[in-house]
Each structure stands twice: as structure tokens, then as C-alpha cells.
Amino acid sequence: MGKRFGSSVRRRGGEWPQQDGVFYLSMTVVVMTTSLLITMSTCPGYYSVQAQQLQLHPVDLGVLQAVKESMWDLPGGTFFSSWQFNFSNSTTDDNPCVSFSGVQCVNVDGFNRVNNLWLGPQTAGSPGLSGSLSPLLGSLNFLSELTISSGSVRGTIPESLGNLLSLQMFSCSENRLSGSIPSSFVNLKSLQILQLGMNSLDGSVPWELGQLPSLKVLVLSDNKLSGPIPLFSPNVPLVHLELRNNFFSGGLPMTLPSSLQYLSLKKNCLTGWLGSGGLMSSSLSSSLSYLDLSYNQFTGVIPSVLFTFPLTFLLLNHNQFTEGLSLTAPINTGSVVDLSYNHLQGPIPSFLSTAQSLFLNNNFFVGAISQDFVSHMEAATLQSLYLQHNYLTDFGSLSSSVLPSNVAFCVQYNCMLPPPQSLCPEKNAGIEAISRPANECATVLRSNSP
């Protein structure tokens, strides 16, 4: 399993641990969803005795032969060892629906028809597959799930997959697919899960993907995709949208589904104001729990309404947000909030003190640390507070507080000496002066004075 956040969120080796948490949360949501569908279709006794005795349809048999010819095990792998075609179909052992790893069938008009292909080992760490996706896969008319485990599958995604009108899930993450996402996917009206992360796909995303009426999970992260983010119909039941680590440009989509719970657009080339897109829709205010827009080029004010969403993670770091923060109520208790590496200024709102982990470092905040922050740290509800590289002039009672051992804070490089209990990430410790030069403080504080 992935690593969870413990009782304290600290930096290790100079990197924010919430990056591990982002990866863990992202992968856990998708893997759990995928595992649910796969488990339902791999339970013992899924096939009746009658289905086991039926002959596999010749078309489907030909497709399996083409798959075996176009794909093979990586060194050390044994997945295809059970795919032997020298049989007569006279016994159960000769039936590919029973004897072939990863093949599952249903009875249609007196024949077995392949309805699920899980290609590659299901055990983590096992060698995957190499080769390419056969265009004949598009002839499996009753296929509902197509999953290729991580490996070295190369080449393009066949346009023929758009013929799979019953397809509910297509997953081929962590391989070496290239080329564009087929426009024929507009035909996949039953598609619920599309996972193509960690490949080398390029080009723009067909706008039709945002209109697929059954789509719930879309993961296209860690590719080379570019162009605008497709518009999503408000009625699409999308729950999980993950497009991080690409080259998407432009602003946020003007509409987003009201069902959306997870949105990651980290590390793209997105620009504009957050208030100009569908993110500010009131329909998201009760559903969105994870938002990562970090490492982009967003500008302007962070809309105050965003802090009222039931967000467990709010990650807006490494952008170009400016001006002060305006909060009308405490943020979601126990949340992780990262607004670091922006151009935010003014005092730090006390309503942020209800977070579990708060990263405001490398901004232009001024003034004092309010008693609310100290109280929450003493109670260990606020466990990580990073305020280094700002222009704060008063640490309040934090300077003399005795904090629990699972609480960490860093206030180095502000406009006064930090308290001795301030513990900073390794890459900051001992490298720079512990407080700002007086001339830097005077310039910024003068510009922030009434």
C-alpha cells in the first residue's frame, strides 16, 4: 500500500511529504476503483458449467491468437505460458475461457464470447508485457473490460478500439504507448474508466471525451499531451480527473461536472484567473475534496469561496497568485493546504489555523502569527506550519511555546530572529541566513503600510 500521512507532515530530504501523499491518494482512488471491477469479474464460480463447456466463437479465438502474436512476456514473465492454441475444445482444459490467464467469457447465442481481458500479471512487481496492441482487439464485440498491466507495451492505440461499444473500462497505464488518443473513442458510450497515465501519448485530447455519458474516472497523467483541457458536460458522472504532468495550456474549463471529487492538474502550462472557470461553480462546493493546481502559471487573487469547499487537499503552490487572502470562515479541519511559492501578501488569516498541515513559505506575508495558530499547534491539531521566506515581524507566543513532539514549524528568513524550536527542511537548514536583511524588510514593509 502507499504511504499515508502520519501524525506529522514533515519534509524529508528537502521535499514536501505531501507529494508522496498526492501520489498515494491519486493512485489509491484509481486502484481501488479498478480493483472493485476486476474482483467482481474474477470471483470463483463466475462461469456456469454450461459456459465452461461452450466453444469460443471463432472471431474471438482469432483475436486471442493475434494478441499472442503481437504481445509477449518481458524476461522473467510467465503470463502467456497458459495461452496454448494446440487444442480441440473437447475438454474444459482446452477452453481458453477457462485455461487462458486473464480471459473471461459470457454465453452469447450458444458461443463463449470474451467479455474481459486482463493482459499481464496481476502481482505487483512481476514483469509485464512487451509488444503492441493488436487492431483486432476492436473485433471483440462483447468486451467490457480491457486492462494491460504495467510493462513495455509500445505503439499507438488502435482506432478500432472505438468499435467496442460495450467497453466499460480501458486501462493501459505505465507502458510506452505513443501517438494520440483515438477520436473514435467518441463511440464508447458505456466507458466508465479510462486510465492511460504514464505513457508517451501526445497531441490534444479529443473534446468528445468530455461528453462521454458514463465516464467516471479519467487518468491521463504523465504523458506529453497538449492543447486545452476538454470541456466536460455538467451531466457527465465524472468523479476522478487526473491530468497532471502534461503540457496542457489555456485556462480551466468553463464547465466541470458537479459530481467531481478529485481534480489534479499539477505541472502543466495553465494560465488565467481561477475565478474565470468552472471551478467556481456552486455545484462543486459540496463534492470536491481534492484539488491540485500546483506548478502552473495561474495569476490573480485566490477566490475566497474556494476556502469554503470541503477540501481535504488544497494544493496551489508554485503559481503566480498575488494580493492577500480573504477567508470568511475556518477552512476544513484537518486539511492539507499548500500555497507556497506564490506572490501572496498581507497578514496571514487566522482562519487557516484549522488545517493539519499548512505551507505558506516563500511569499510576501507580513505582520504577526496570531494566537489561533499557536493554540492549534499546542493542541497538535495543526501539526505542520511552514512560514519561512516571508516578511513576518512578530511570532507572538510561538517564541516561548512548548509544542508536542509531533508538531513541526519553520519561520526562518523573516524579519526577526526565529525561536530556537523552529525546525526547517534539510535543504534550508544552515544554508541561508536565519533572518532577512534589514533593507529587504524595510522595502516590503513600507509597501504594505497603509
Image (cartoon, rainbow, N blue to C red):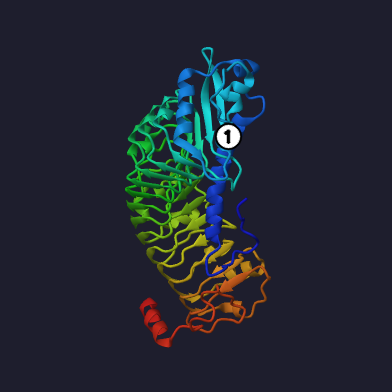
Q: Give the amino acid type for the residue marked by disc 1 in the picture.
A: Ser
**10 Å neighbourhood of mark 1: few (<14), some, or many (≥20)?**
few
| Of 59 and 11, the residue lying toward us | 59
Q: Where residue 92 sits: x, y (%)?
A: 63, 20
Q: Residue at x 53, y 81 (%)?
A: 430
Question: Where's residue 362, x and y in %?
Answer: 45, 71
Q: How far across and how far down the image is residue 423, in percent?
A: 59, 75
Q: Is residue 202 above or below residue 62?
A: below
Total marks in image: 1
**Quadrant location of residue 158?**
top left
- Residue 312 seen in the figure: no
* Position in image of residue 305 (x %, y %): 44, 54
SS of the residue at dot 1? helix
Q: In the picture, which quadrant includes the C terminus?
A: bottom left
Q: Left or right of 277: which side holds 105?
A: right
What residue sits right under mark 1 in the picture?
Answer: 81
62 shown above or below 130? above
- Residue lying at 47% horizontally and 61% vertically, measured from the top left: 327
